[in-house]
Image (cartoon, rainbow, N blue to C red):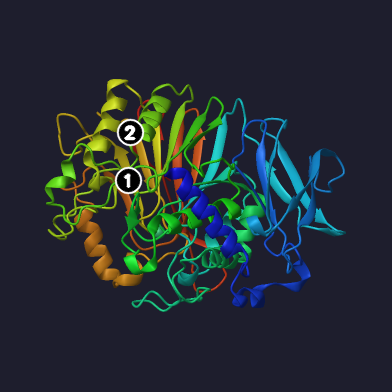
Amino acid sequence: MRIISVLFFNCFIIFLSAQSLYVKEINALLNPALKPFYFGVASGDPGQTEVVIWTKVWNETSEPVNVKWEVAIDTLMQHIVATGQLITDTSSANTIKIQVKELMPNTTYFYRFTTGDVFSPTGRTKTAPVEADELRFAVVSCNNYEHGYFNAYRLIANRNDISAVIHLGDYIYEYGANNSTKHPSVRQHIPDHEILTLQDYRSRYAQYRLDKDLQEAHRLHPFISEWDDHEFANDAYIDGAKNHQPEEGDWKTREAIAKKVYFEWIPITDNATDNIIRKLSYGNLADVFMLDGRTEGRCKQVESPYDTMLTCVTRTMLGKKQCDWLTAGIDNSPAQWKVVANQVVFSELDAHQLSKKHAINPDAWDGYPEERKEILDSFYQHQVKNIIIMTGDIHLSWAFDLVQNPKDKSRYNAKTGKGVIGAEYVVPSVSSNGLGERFPRGLCNLIGSIIKHKSTNPHLRFQNLVDHGYVLLDLNKERAKATWFFCKTLKSRSPQYKAKDSYSTKFNENRLVREK
Ligand SMILES: [Fe+2]
């Protein structure tokens, strides 16, 4: 049965490939000076001896295109260390991805592509170290094109001190144009309808990747990426999504299209099953665990916090296989810091004083308490500490002491750090609307004071509910420090931040402290 459905899907894809790759509105966004490399270059999934490099050749015909690639140790591309050629065609939307191997650890490389006599821009990337005293990652999530300019990406592109960008998902949004009724769009989505078809998804990625700031961040840093829900549709789970209706067609077909296009456009290691679950090793200092909290094992969200199904032991977000992989991987990790690139908020968050109906967020880990308990039980049982959970999805900034049963004073003490095994750093959206766009500042402050109260959420140590930007995760042998950089504006291009806040957790001590 599976073979028949795979064959059917492949035929379906071939049929769709016969039509134009993109909606015609994309043409107006192309800068003729960059032809045919309008979408720049990118790299990703850096290992100690390998990295993925990516580009896309714009081809108006369906003819295959021959592309040469080169990797060098100098910006002038004179000392070439790896090179090759390949042919791309419309079956992959003329995207090109190469896994460059036999590189040196902890080394900066430069790369470019050539077709005919035209060179692509030169990209910069960096392999992972075997031994490191310090590592820095820029961590991002949720860049909605309509909601503002990607100034966080410009801030990141301007840095020369990071090893990689970790993207926690919502790299695109599936909505049509002017979707937000509460806040005027800064820019309009192409196509103007909700994306459903192969052409739609490709067009949406094309539009996002023509953003100069995102393109420059890709050109200058390797990305380590995972998807969340909007790469598919809002509140996606294994069999559907809140924003997918029966009249929009078969969910599994839509999911397969979305995965195919994600792997076409994102500089992520290819594999036969379009699987994003993987571990990246940064030597002695960090292991980075990339999760799929959407398509692998997530049961449908409950409708209400009082649904008796909430605590059913068979309800999972990761699924048993992924959950076992994560707990075993963390238990056995020799690295000093175990970084988990996680989509939705992991820590308990009690919001019942704001709203009884919305006392928990059923799409977050609060909606899957039994699987979370299993994961935390494993960490405590094996006495694992120094776990850093990086979270996106929610469009606000929080820092939690990572702890089980935060309200149980016999097990957790915020002052001494008793019971704390790590930290959860929640990163703001790059641009997607948050509370600040929905409510006046005074109401946001009131909401904030209710949430961040020691009687309801004693483990919540920092919050900013209104600003947008990114987090710099700075790891060394003594501490894991997060710095939230908040953009000055999203309404125009601006390479400035207006404020920053830093919290850190000391190695083996794990209590969050504010840093000046
Ligand atoms: Fe989001």
x and y percentages locating residue 17 in the rendered image: 61, 63
Residue 386 vs residue 417: left or right?
right
Residue 235 vs residue 38: left or right?
left
195 in relation to 152, above or below: below
x and y percentages locating residue 148 in the rendered image: 49, 70
Please, what is the three-letter code of the amino acid marked with disc 1?
Answer: Arg
Q: Which residue is mark 1?
A: 298
Residue 217 vs residue 489: left or right?
right
Q: Which residue is mark 2?
A: 320
Secondary structure state at the residue bearing disc 1: loop
x and y percentages locating residue 477 in the rendered image: 50, 27
The answer, for residue 442, to whether it is visible in the render is: yes
Residue 284 vs residue 175: left or right?
right
Residue at point 84%, 48% (across, down): 76
Residue at point 44%, 59% (across, down): 254
60 in relation to 426, above or below: below
Q: Pointer 2: residues within 10 angstroms few (<14), some, or many (20+)? A: some
How many discs mark residues in the rendered view? 2
Q: Are marks 1 and 2 in contact (CB under 8 Å)?
A: no
